[in-house]
Image (tube, rainbow, N blue to C red):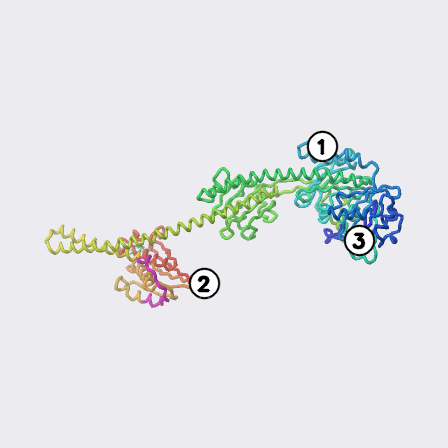
Amino acid sequence: MSEFKVDLSNCDREPIHIPGQIQSHGFLVVLDQDSNVSHCSDNIYDLLQQDYTTLLGSPLQYVELLLGNDCPPGFITNLLSLERINKSFEQINPVKMEVLDKLYYLIISTAADNYLLEFEPVLSDALSDVQKMMGHSISKMLADKNFQSLLDNTALQVKNTIHYDRVMIYRFAEDGHGEVVAEAKNDDLGSWFGLHYPASDIPKQARELYKKNLTRIIADVHTKPSKILTLAYNGQQPLDLTCSQLRAVSPIHIQYLKNMGVASSFSISLLVKNELWGLIACHNYTPSFIDYRSRESSKLLGQILSSALEFRQEEIHQHTQEVFKNNLDKVTKQLQETTAIEDALTKYPVNLLDITHASGAILVYEKNIIKLGITPDNIQLTGLMDWLRESNTRPIYHVKSLSAVYPEAIDYSDIASGMMVAVISRELEEYVIFFKPEQVQTITWAGNPEKPVEIDPNGLMQISPRNSFQEWSQTVKATSVGWSIEEISSVLRLKEEVTYAINQKAGAIRLLNEKLQQAYDELDTFSYTISHDLKNPIAAIKSYAQLLAISQVFSDRDQKLLDRIVNRADQMKLMIDAVLDYSRIGRSEFEYKRIDTRELIQEIVKDLDLVYDTRNLTITIGETPELDGEPMMMTQIFSNLIGNAVKYSGHLENANVHIEGTVSDTHICYTVKDNGIGIAPKDLINVFGLFNRMDNVKDIEGSGVGLAIVKRIVEKHKGRIWAESELNEGSVFFVSFNR
Ligand code: ADP
């Protein structure tokens, strides 16, 4: 196997599970599928008094023979078949045997198709003491319910079991760096409690191995490892030592330990929910081997601590989850029972602020921002919203250092270093946003974490093990407490509930619209019928009044009254006709035709002087793009608009009316512009109402019906009508149709 060179680019890939050598305090014999020796460590002579050349390729029986009386023929073969039944060596390991007057533990494990037989020395004071001590240790460990005491006690009990100079409990943070959270040490050593170690101190692949193999001993950093030898034809495949006890240590790690002055190191993995929570890391400053039994006892302590941690974590997790869930249930109920979504989320005693540990929250909904708790101000929020729009974040997005991704946020890092966004609608720019304040933290690193790279004597950059462990303080600013899994799930559920509520409300509005349309249609029919039925009695009133006037002679006064009756009856007929026209539009079905707008306008203009005073009037017609619509109705639109323009300007000096159409990608828009008496801007919304006339047109005849009819026709054609005007300046009426 070619040697792997560690440098800046590949440190995380150093194949530490296949180092090609073992630590030399033990011996390794590897069997292939046929139970022949495929590999052995180059120190094997010390165990078996046989040179590796005679051993490699020989059958297991030969090894058994060499191992002597404690290993009768077929003994190891039987152990291997037991593994096939149990599917593990856990119950078999270790087997104690005496080889050439020395006691060894035989520990068997697998590596792909091979069996690893590892022989390690047994230390004399092993078994009985350890077992007694374990019971004692476990009860001491669990004596105190307090979390820190649990950690402290565990460190102490492990120290009592293995007698190392320093035992630390090391906890990994989310970013992979570690912190010493408990420590038991000799009095003469300085404390490392509370120190932080950069993530690069334990590379990724080492962490993976810690998950697979729960204990790891480095017996003596100063001894030379033993090479693993093999027959030439086996040489291609490196031997996987993931499950091995004796696996040699990466030279980088050896140097790291030497730099710390450590001679022996032992670690026990702490797994919580199958993830590496931390390590019990043990250091001895003189070489000190711990035999397999003692390592297993310590492993047990580690496992007990792991379960206690898992239990505790689960307890905290469940409690927080419960609190958030209850609050969210309340908010959901409010969403179902309250018409306004914003009220449901913000106006009740239990609101958005109660579903996470955020200290501030905002709801951005229907162009409003509603703030709860401590939040940035409106200007800051507007900037943040612009950034959110541009950065197109994921539907649930959270950071604990907002200013790292959005630098402007540094101005308000005291209130919003942490941010979690739930996008309700990206198109409408509607969000729920949660904020957490800055939590200034001082981290004391064991050495400057930013300098794991050093220049080697050849001037090349190298990942070299740190050699400075001098305390180095760092203040972490503009960072909040992170967002927990419970908070994220809570916000996720909130987003779902809000979306559901919005959809339901949209459904309700659609239903309401349909009802409204129905009522509208009924009203149309009603007004049509009423107006239609009124026509006859009115005509009769008029006729009778006229008959009366002819058949009798009245005084002047009475004659005037009779004239008024006739006059009012005429007026009423006009109004009824108008209402009939108006409601007819709503009721009629029609066919679209292509309209020659130019011709239509010219016809209208031609007849104007029959009705209005057009002596001072100039009418100009610009572009006249064709329109699609019902021809009679289209004529009504233009004759009303042009008629009004002339009516309300024609009597003035230099009256000008201009008509033109413009075409855009999506619309055709016509404008009718005059320089007449104009409309007060505040009245502009009223001109389209039925029978509405403005104050400045008292002297000009009209019914207040034309624009109402025009508006209805335009809307019937799916178009839009609006006006711009100033009093005494003139007016522009716009009608726009989809293309
Ligand atoms: P009318 O028969 O009174 O003209 P309309 O419905 O056509 O009824 O118009 C409603 C009101 O809008 C008018 O009475 C007038 O006050 C105002 N109006 C409409 N067009 C113009 C215009 N070009 N210039 C000024 N006022 C106008």
| Front-most of residues 213 and 375 | 213
Residue 201: x, y in percent?
73, 46
Residue at (47%, 44%) from the top-left corner?
341
> Could you tell me which secondary element the residue under label 1 belongs to?
helix
Tell me, yes or no, whether the two marked residues, 2 and 1, touch with CB atoms within 8 Å.
Answer: no
Relative side of 257 to 275, left or right: right
Looking at the image, is mark 1 or mark 3 nearer the viewer?
3
> Could you tell me which secondary element the residue under label 3 belongs to?
loop
What is the C-alpha distance between the residues marked 3 and 2? Answer: 78 Å
| Front-most of residues 317 and 60 | 60
Amino acid type assigned to the residue bearing label 1 in the image:
Ser
> Closer to the N terminus: mark 2 or mark 1?
1
Residue position marked by numbered label 3 in the rendering: 32
Residue 503: x, y in percent?
47, 49
User: For mark 3, does the 10 Å Cα neighbourhood hold few (<14), some (14 to 19), or many (20 or more) residues?
Assistant: some
Residue segment shown in magenta: 584-602
Residue position marked by numbered label 2 in the rendering: 665
